Amino acid sequence: MENIRNFCIIAHIDHGKSTLADRLLEFTGTVTDREMQAQVLDNMDLEREKGITIKSHAIQMNYKLDGKDYVLNLIDTPGHVDFSYEVSRSIAACEGALLIVDASQGIEAQTISNLYLALENDLEIIPVLNKIDLPHAMPEEVTDEIVEMIGCKREDVIHASGKEGIGIEDILKAVVHRIKAPKGDPKAPLQAMIFDSVFNSFRGIEVIFRVVNGTIRKGEKVKFVSTGQEYGADEIGILRLNQQPCNEISAGNVGYLISGIKVAKEVHVGDTITNAINPGASLGGFQEVKPMVFAGIYPVDTTEFEELRASMEKLQLNDASLVWELETSAALGFGFRCGFLGMLHMEIIQERLEREFNMTVITTVPSVQFKAYLTDGTQVDINAPSEMPDPTKMDYIEEPYIKAQIISKAEYIGAIIGLCMDKRGIILNQNYLTTDRVEMSFEMPLSEIVFDFFDKLKSISRGYASLDYHLIGFRESDMVKLDIMLNGEKVDALSAIVHRGKSQEWGRKLCEKLKELIPRQMFEIAIQAAIGQKIVSRENISAIRKNVIAKCYGGDISRKRKLLEKQKKGKKRMRQIGTVEVPQEAFMAILKIE
Ligand code: GTP
């Protein structure tokens, strides 16, 4: 056990974790040249395409130093705030962390939030100044920032470049010398912490764990403490680039378990695996992952509802953080109300449904969860605008609030404060990291931040601001339901819950936006916004006079067909609501309002 080191790599998004992990794997010969491809651990297609890490990945390396053989378990973690729960669980399985900071960017919001997570778990921090090959790298300034932030010595900061392979050996040496070997008793009753699970369509769920005490042996009966379920340890093994089965894994080490578990929900990250016959105690609780954003997902073609249900079920086997229930909409028919960790997660689910399951879906206006307190003393959760209770029966509403950390260049402070105030935020404090970089914290309603806040923040700061946030609770708020009517018919899938102070303006802007987005049809379309019985805005889309086909005067049949086909393609993401065809973009219109 004294030869094992468990460490993770934490950083702000894009600071180069995955690239650096590639170099470590190469250097230790864990992947051969033939197996090597960039960001080898990001094995989902989507991860490769978007260049981001969505899931954590664990991999074991062998490393020889001063004549001794070491086993290094590396856990790569995602940087995007939607997936920060993945980071926290990975951290809990390690004794140390490489904290990667991009030498051209400096410390960013998630650098700090991940560092705090690591410190809370008593991890040894190895600071790495990465991308020193960049011509605009600022090694001196950024080292100052790092020293200031973690209180280390300048010489503790390792200079590296994942791209050029600089500093890789120094990092490995530091891992061995500075990170403590794991503690634990291999003879004690088994206690292993689950820190991840992966779905494999052939082999079922693979559970990734760290053994804290005891030894897990192939073929034994194990029990998951939180559910009390027992499984046979059919296969256990260590994680190389491919899985490597073995007969036992002891305290301090990381491994996988395959035992015929079919559903991701049976596996709770943070749960304890123990021996069914000689059980050890639970290692402590785990946090359920809570969705932040809710939206409806509907098939474009109503006959595909059952197929969509089957696809959602399969996707959920794979992604335990996706939650959904049936929903019916007067406008869209049968569909699902889904909970996501954030907008990126929502986008990924939509894309996976389309790519992996060949479904064409409409996603409705995303919303956060509100809590309504009724005059009869009961409380209901509102996950969709259609669930908003009758205002006369309602005492008050609460909405979720977050605390946000924003780091930016000092020159953008004014613009950022302006933006946050416009989003109903309150500034809590400002703290200069260096003369030019400032950390600000705000309290703000979650509903104002999950949608397009980040894009706006990036644009007003010319890309120089970073954001991190976490929920702090619910607060009373004056929210109203804004309804949209098309030709006098209320379209439930277009309504939204908005703050009363902004509701009139939003009604007007939403009508204008919908006018742009809904294509002209054979008849006039009236778009109205209403709050309760009161119409607050109206726009008209005039009718098209001519039939498109009339343009090509009989004659050329292939041209006619082409035109029709073109129209059909355009229809792909359209839904017929009453008599009106509404494109996908219209459901997201409220997010595009300036
Ligand atoms: P997430 O997993 O999405 O959080 O990103 P990451 O931190 O893993 O970053 P990744 O390794 O994907 O690198 C982000 C970008 O920086 C890519 O375009 C890399 O090619 C580039 N990059 C990474 N390391 C270096 C480096 O040392 N020097 C230079 N010049 N570019 C680098």
Image (cartoon, rainbow, N blue to C red):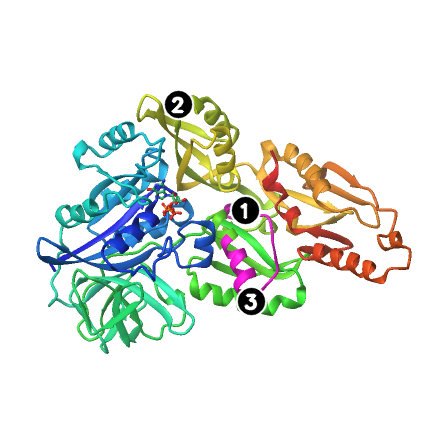
- The dot on residue 309 is 3
Frontmost residue, 81 versus 243:
243
Is 356 placed left or right of 434 in the picture? right
Mark 3 or mark 1, which is nearer the start of the sequence? 3
The type of residue carrying mark 3 is Arg
- The crowding category of the residue bearing disc 1, from other C-alpha atoms within 10 Å (few below 14, some 14 to 19, many at least 20), is many
Amino acid type at circle 2 is: Ala
Q: Distance between the residues labelled 1 and 3?
A: 22 Å
Q: Position of residue 245 (x, y in %)?
A: 26, 72
Label at residue 328? none
| Up-down relation of residue 314 to residue 454 (above or below) | below
Q: How many marks?
A: 3
Q: Magenta span has 365?
A: yes
- The residue identified by callout 1 is 367
Q: Which of 28 and 551 is in front in this view?
A: 28
Q: In this view, does 304 lie to the left or right of 450?
A: right
Q: In this view, does 464 lie above or below 281?
A: above
Looking at the picture, how far across and down is residue 482, in whole percent? 64, 42
Secondary element type, mark 3: helix
Marks 1, 3: nearer the viewer: 3
Of labels 2 and 3, earlier in sequence is 3
Characterize the local packing of mark 2: few (<14), some (14-19) or many (20 or more) Cα atoms within 10 angstroms. some
| Coordinates of residue 70 in the picture (x, y in percent) | 15, 58
Residue shown at the point (35%, 56%) measured from the top left: 41
Q: Name the residue under label 2.
A: 410
Name the quadrant of the C terminus: top right
